[in-house]
Image: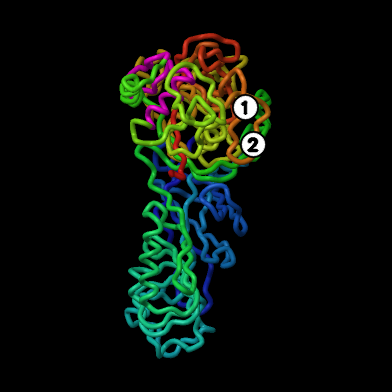
Amino acid sequence: MKHQLVILFIIALTGFASAQSTAFTYQGHLMDAGASANGNYDLHFTLKNALTDGSTVGTPQAVSPVTAVNGIFSVTLDFGSASFDGSDRWVELGVRPAGSVAPYTALSPRQRLTATPYALRALNATNLTGTVTAGNIANGTITGTMIANGAVGSTQLSPDLTMDGTTTGTFSGPLTGNVTGNVSGSAASFTGNLAGNVTGPQGSTIVEMVGGVTAANVAAGANLANAATTASTPNTLVKRDANGNIPGVAPVSAAPSGMVLIPAGAFTMGNTVAADTDITDAAPVSTTVSAFYMDVNEVTLSQWDVVYLWAIDHGYSFTSSGTSSGANYPVDGVSWYDCVKWCNARSELTGKTPVYYTNNEQTTIYKTGDVDVTNAQVKWSAGGYRLPTEAEWEKAARGGLSGQRFPWGMLIKEGLANYYRMPLRFYPDGFSYDLGADGGSNPTGNIYGRASTASQVGQFAPNGYGLNDMAGNVYEWCWDWYGTPYVGGTDPRGVVSGSSRVVRGGSWNMFGYYRGSAGVARCASRLYVNPVDATTAGINDTYASYGFRSVLSAAQP
């Protein structure tokens, strides 16, 4: 049973009490196997300080039973005011059938909350009359809109009132204390002197002002800050000093067409599923990778052909011209050497600096022959296309999840990936986590019905990073020589030499019986292939079912 969460909105509790509650109503839309869910469920809510990984904030809350009608459900949550200090917060939701003792299934992606989802909203601002002192109003409950619209004027505010919380609208005159949260409009909406700190989204930038500055300086600072960032980084923090200076901020450009950003950060590389004792070469190790862009899909035949035809007219040679079932199917029948040269050609064709060279001085671009390029001959700082390292591939495949077999969870079936099905109930040496309807090739997305072949790219749901076919379809070449144990650490690039290169992700391929199964589609499963003759674990065949996808460094020169 596959669940998916779609958040509709979050409702803040309302009332007129002088003491502010920190409870809020959370409403969402729960999907079950592609349809709106109906019935009772146990839900588990964990507050996190990051979209992926990160730490738990406050105490997780379990709510049961929760009734979903046409997918819609509502619950009341209270993580306490200490959990909301103005920093970004996300809710991670787990779900299981009501009354079940099974583990919760974690849904992704996490859902973002406002800085103070429990903030009071007055039903009618005209009910506020007379003098309101700071002691009777919790911080953050009076918004800028109420002040701007005249609902609360200067005569109603006690001089000792400090405003904290979401503030919108136009302010005039001196404002002291702290303003946190959303500041709508341009900074020019402020007139007079501003003292204290301003934090929160300002246009596409978060601006922090320290010290008393004039409205003109605020407006100028916002313009400079916006120029230092891009629309693709709305939560970039830009700090201005009291003199109005902005330290250098490295902009992150929008993802190139057909690619997605894989964020920098640490993850556990390798097998963490205790039951999967058959994986003996992937002991878990903490690994950190820098941000990079990755092709959403495996390189298709149409993509391959454009670069290939340009390359052979510009000094490149390839062992194979590439095979495939069609233009929008992944190219296969390509060696590791061909993929590396193709990446260089793609770089040159698009005006980027190639990554792979045949000398340590990195002056001779790798274009011909079967050359075992070394780490020293790779211009890692270049802005060109390249194969992912094994660590980059696994981080991307996991899609932000941890401790799971597959990019989406613990189980696999034909509706999730194109793989060779071997359920334990049909095969004595099959897999308990393979829930395929029967054994053999997967007919889903297959141009020949039940026959063995790759499927068109993007036929199955993407993982948490938006990548398609990270399990099954065709094996994907990685940069690394195969070696054990994992190197781990920061931006590892594998052992310095070897006889086989790493391939990852599994495939549709039934040849060799085990090679296209659920076992090799796991995120931690590693295979090794001779880069020229595609000898996999001692089994010779053609390159059929070996493809690739390319990556770019996020820090483009």
351 in magenta: no
Camera-side residue: 548 or 511?
Answer: 548
The picture places residue 64, in percent across and down from the top left corner, at: 56, 51
Q: Residue at x 43, y 78 (%)?
A: 213
* Residue 367 to residue 404: above or below: above
Q: Residue at x 51, y 14 (%)?
A: 532
Q: Please give the count of numbered marks on the rendered protein.
A: 2
Left or right: residue 528 versus residue 358 is right
Residue projecting furthest to the top: 540
Q: Amino acid at mark 1?
A: Val
Which of disc 2 and disc 1 is earlier in sequence?
Answer: 2
Q: Residue at x 42, y 28 (%)?
A: 343
For label 1, the residue is 496
Camera-side residue: 100 or 447?
Answer: 447
The picture places residue 239, in percent across and down from the top left corner, at: 48, 65
- Callout 2 environment at 10 Å: few (<14), some (14 to 19), or many (20+)? some
Q: Residue at x 50, y 16 (%)?
A: 439
344 in magenta: yes
> SS class of the residue under badge 1?
loop
Tell me which segment is drawn in magenta. Answer: 319-347
> SS class of the residue under badge 2?
loop
Q: Is residue 437 visible?
A: no
For label 2, the residue is 488
Q: Amino acid at mark 2?
A: Gly
Model colouring: rainbow
